[in-house]
Image (tube, rainbow, N blue to C red):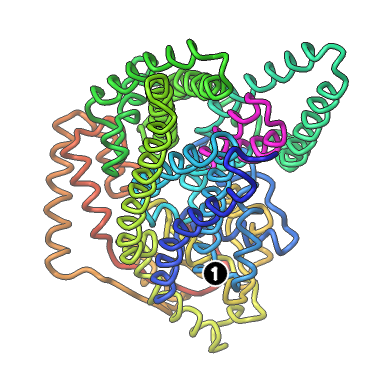
C-alpha cells in the first residue's frame, strides 16, 4: 500500500530505526570485552538454542513455575528458533546469544516503526518512535540484550498491538505479522496468553463480520479469505511443535499448563489487586522517567485512564473521517487490553514477580499515543491550513527530539551494561577453566574427552544456577555431558544420562556441601573458589541469625528450614516480612564457596 507521506516515507522509517540501533551496538561492544558465563535460565536457554542446530529440536519453551516441581514449561520454542540464526552466525558463543537477543529486539522496533508509518504516516511514526524510546529507556540495555524469556516478548508485544490495530483498520497483510508476534509472545512467556488470546478473538470476530458483510463484493471476500487462511496456516505452522509434543506424550506440556492454571495451588491475588497493579503500570511518569515498579501509587495511572476514556469522545464524534476511525480502532485495542490485563494480573498467585506485568508499559505508551492523537484531532478543528502545517512540523520536531533524548540516555546506559547475573556467575570464571584443564589432563578415570560425564550439583543455592552454567560450558567445550532424570524438563530429555551409561561424575558442590565432598576419598577436587572476604563471612552469620529470628517471630518456621536448605525459595516466600526478605536477599548476594569434584558415577545430590 502507499503510505500517507509518499513513496519515500520508508527513508524516515529506516533513519529512525538506525538511531535505535546505535545503543544496541554500543551495548554489544561493551559486552564483548569479557567472557560471559550464562547461568540458570540463560544457561538453559543456550542449551535449547544449541539444540536447534544439533537436530534435537526444542518443542516447548523454557521451564517455569508451572505444574509440580520442574514439571511444566512455557508453551513453545519459537524464541529459540528465532535466536538461533544470529547465534550460529556469530560463533555460538555466550556473547553471540546476547547479540541474537539484541537483534530480535531491534527487529521488533523496526517492525513497530514500519507498521506505525503504514497506519498514520510521519506523525504516528515519530509518536510511536518516542514511545519506543521511552520503553527502551525503561527496560534498559541489560533487559534488551539478554534472551531471558520474560524479557524477549516486551517489544514484540508492541508489534502485536500495532498489527492488530492494522488488521482492524482493514490492512490485511498485517495479519501474519500479528500471528507471528502474538505467537512469539505467548510461546515465550505464559503471562501474555490472556492478552494475545483475547485480542486474537476480537480479530477473528471482526474478520468473520467483514467477510459476511462483503456480500457480493467478490474481491473483498477473496482478500479477507486469502489473508485469513494465510494467517491461520502460519499459526498452525508456528504451533506445530508444541502440539506434536502434546500428542506424543502421556501428559503433554499444554495439558500441564491447562491443569495448573485452571486448578492453581494457591488462591489468585484477585481482580481488585489486578486493577491496582495495572494502574501502577499505566502511570505515565514512571514510563517517561524509566521507573519500572510492581507496586506504588495508582493515582498517575488512574488519571491517565480517565483522560484516555474522555479522549475517546473526540474520534467517536469525528468517526466519518478515516483518521478518526483508525484512532477508534486503537482505542478499542487499548480498552480490550486494559480489561484483559487487569483480569490476567488478578489471576497471578504466589509471589508477584515484576516481570509478569512488563507488557503493561506498552499499553501505557499506546494510551499516550491515542490521547495525543485525540488532542490533535480536536486542535485541527480550530486551526487554519497554515497553522496545521506549522503545528504538524513542530509536533514532529518535538517528538523526534524526545526520541533522541531517550536514546541518548539509553546509549549512556548501554556503555555501562554488564553481563546478566555477572555476580552469580563469577565463580564459573575459575571453576570452568580449572575443570576443563583437569579433564583434559587425562589422569581421571572415565573423565576425559572420550568419557560420558554425568554432571550433578546442588539445587539449594540459587536454584542450582552455577550447575546449569557448568553443564552448558562443559558441553560448549566439547565434552559428552548429561545429567539426572529429575532435571529432564530443565536440561531437556536428550541430556538425561542414566547411571549405567556414565563413565564418571562431575559434581559441583556449594556452601557446607564442599566439606562433605572433601570427605569422599574416591572423588578428586579439581576446582575451588571462594570470593568472600572475612567481613563477608561475618556479615553472613549475622544476617542469618537476624533473618531466622524474624522468621520465627512471624511464625514462619517452615521458611526457617529453607534458609540453609534452599535459600532462594526462603527469600521469595510471599509470606516474608519485607525487612526479612531484604536480609535473605543479601545472604544470596554474599554467596559461599564452590568446588568441583570428579570421580566414579553416582546419583548423590
Name the spot of residue 125 as percent of width and height, x first. 50, 42
Which quadrant does the N terminus fall into?
top right
The structure residue drawn at horizontal position 54% and vertical position 25%, both measured from the top left corner, is 323
Name the spot of residue 198 as percent of width and height, x first. 58, 22
Q: Nearer the viewer, residue 490 or 304?
A: 304
Q: How many labels does the image show?
A: 1
Residue 401 visible, this orientation:
yes
Q: Which of 396 and 570 is in front in this view?
A: 396
Is residue 131 part of the magenta span, yes or no? no
Where 144 falls versus 150 (above or below)?
below
Q: Which of 597 and 237 is in front in this view?
A: 237
For label 1, the crowd category at 10 Å Cα-Cα, with few meaning under 14, some 14 to 19 and many 20 or more, is many
> Image quadrant of residue 601?
bottom right
Residue 513 visible, this orientation:
no
Where 3 falls versus 79 (above or below)?
above
> Which segment is the magenta one?
156-182
- Give the residue at mark 1: 505
Name the spot of residue 395 as percent of width and height, x first. 37, 39
Q: Is mark 1 on a helix, strand or loop?
A: strand
The structure residue drawn at horizontal position 54% and vertical position 69%, both measured from the top left corner, is 505
> Image quadrant of residue 477?
bottom right
User: Left or right of 559: which side holds 81?
Assistant: right
Q: Is the magenta stretch mostly helix, strand or loop?
A: helix
Name the spot of residue 561 as percent of width and height, x first. 28, 41
Where 478 falls versus 256 (above or below)?
below
> Image quadrant of residue 378?
top left
Is residue 164 part of the magenta span, yes or no? yes
Amino acid at each position: 500500500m502507499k503510505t500517507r507521506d509518499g513513496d519515500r516515507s520508508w527513508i524516515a522509517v529506516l533513519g529512525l530505526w538506525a538511531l535505535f540501533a546505535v545503543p544496541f551496538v554500543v551495548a554489544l561492544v561493551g559486552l564483548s570485552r569479557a567472557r560471559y558465563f550464562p547461568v540458570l535460565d540463560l544457561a538453559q536457554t543456550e542449551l535449547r538454542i544449541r539444540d536447534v542446530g544439533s537436530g534435537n529440536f526444542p518443542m516447548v519453551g523454557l521451564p517455569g513455575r508451572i505444574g509440580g516441581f520442574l514439571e511444566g514449561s512455557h508453551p513453545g520454542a519459537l524464541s529459540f528458533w528465532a535466536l538461533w540464526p544470529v547465534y550460529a552466525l556469530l560463533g555460538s558463543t555466550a556473547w553471540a546469544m546476547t547479540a541474537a537477543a539484541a537483534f530480535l529486539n531491534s527487529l521488533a522496533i523496526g517492525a513497530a516503526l514500519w507498521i506505525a508509518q503504514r497506519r498514520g504516516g510521519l506523525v504516528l511514526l515519530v509518536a510511536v518512535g518516542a514511545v519506543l524510546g521511552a520503553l527502551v529507556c525503561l527496560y534498559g540495555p541489560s533487559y534488551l540484550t539478554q534472551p531471558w524469556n520474560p524479557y524477549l516478548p516486551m517489544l514484540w508485544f508492541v508489534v502485536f498491538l500495532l498489527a492488530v490495530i492494522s488488521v482492524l483498520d482493514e490492512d490485511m497483510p498485517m495479519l501474519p505479522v500479528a500471528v507471528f508476534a502474538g505467537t512469539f509472545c505467548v510461546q515465550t512467556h505464559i503471562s501474555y496468553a490472556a492478552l494475545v488470546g483475547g485480542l486474537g478473538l476480537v480479530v477473528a470476530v471482526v474478520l468473520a463480520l467483514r467477510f459476511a458483510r462483503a456480500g457480493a463484493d467478490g474481491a473483498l471476500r477473496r482478500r479477507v479469505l486469502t489473508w485469513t487462511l494465510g494467517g491461520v496456516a502460519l499459526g498452525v505452522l508456528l504451533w506445530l511443535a508444541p502440539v506434536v509434543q502434546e500428542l506424543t506424550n502421556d501428559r503433554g506440556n499444554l495439558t500441564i499448563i491447562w491443569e495448573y492454571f485452571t486448578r492453581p495451588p494457591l488462591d489468585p491475588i484477585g481482580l481488585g489487586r489486578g486493577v491496582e497493579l495495572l494502574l501502577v503500570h499505566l502511570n505515565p511518569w514512571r514510563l517517561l522517567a524509566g521507573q519500572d515498579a510492581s507496586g506504588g501509587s495508582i493515582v498517575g495511572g488512574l488519571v491517565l485512564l480517565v483522560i484516555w476514556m474522555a479522549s475517546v469522545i473526540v474520534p467517536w464524534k469525528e468517526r466519518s473521517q478515516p483518521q478518526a476511525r483508525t484512532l477508534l480502532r486503537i482505542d478499542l485495542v487499548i480498552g480490550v487490553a486494559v480489561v484483559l490485563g487487569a483480569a490476567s494480573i488478578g489471576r497471578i498467585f504466589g509471589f508477584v514477580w515484576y516481570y509478569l506485568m512488563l507488557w503493561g508499559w506498552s499499553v501505557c505508551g499506546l494510551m499516550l499515543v491515542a490521547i495525543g492523537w485525540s488532542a490533535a484531532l480536536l486542535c485541527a478543528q480550530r486551526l487554519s491550513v497554515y497553522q496545521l502545517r506549522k503545528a504538524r512540523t513542530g509536533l514532529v520536531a518535538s517528538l523526534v527530539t524526545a526520541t533522541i533524548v531517550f536514546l541518548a540516555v539509553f546509549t549512556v546506559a548501554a556503555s555501562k551494561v554488564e553481563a546478566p547475573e555477572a555476580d552469580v556467575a563469577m565463580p564459573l570464571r575459575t571453576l570452568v577453566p580449572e575443570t576443563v584443564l583437569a579433564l583434559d589432563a587425562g589422569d581421571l578415570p572415565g573423565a576425559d574427552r572420550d568419557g560420558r560425564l554425568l554432571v550433578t550439583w546442588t539445587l539449594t543455592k540459587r536454584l542450582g544456577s552455577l550447575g546449569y552454567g557448568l553443564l552448558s560450558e562443559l558441553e560448549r567445550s566439547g565434552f559428552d555431558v548429561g545429567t539426572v532424570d529429575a532435571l529432564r524438563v530443565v536440561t531437556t530429555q536428550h541430556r538425561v544420562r542414566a547411571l549405567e551409561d556414565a563413565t564418571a561424575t562431575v559434581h559441583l558442590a556449594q556452601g557446607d556441601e564442599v566439606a562433605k565432598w572433601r570427605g569422599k576419598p574416591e572423588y578428586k577436587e579439581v576446582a575451588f573458589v571462594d570470593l568472600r572476604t572475612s567481613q563477608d563471612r561475618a556479615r553472613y552469620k549475622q544476617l542469618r541469625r537476624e533473618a531466622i529470628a524474624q522468621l520465627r517471630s512471624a511464625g514462619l518456621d517452615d521458611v526457617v528450614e529453607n534458609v540453609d536448605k534452599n535459600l532462594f525459595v526462603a527469600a521469595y516466600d510471599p509470606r516474608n516480612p519485607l525487612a526479612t526478605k531484604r536480609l535473605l536477599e543479601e545472604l544470596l548476594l554474599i554467596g559461599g564457596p564452590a568446588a568441583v569434584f570428579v570421580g566414579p558415577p553416582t546419583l548423590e545430590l
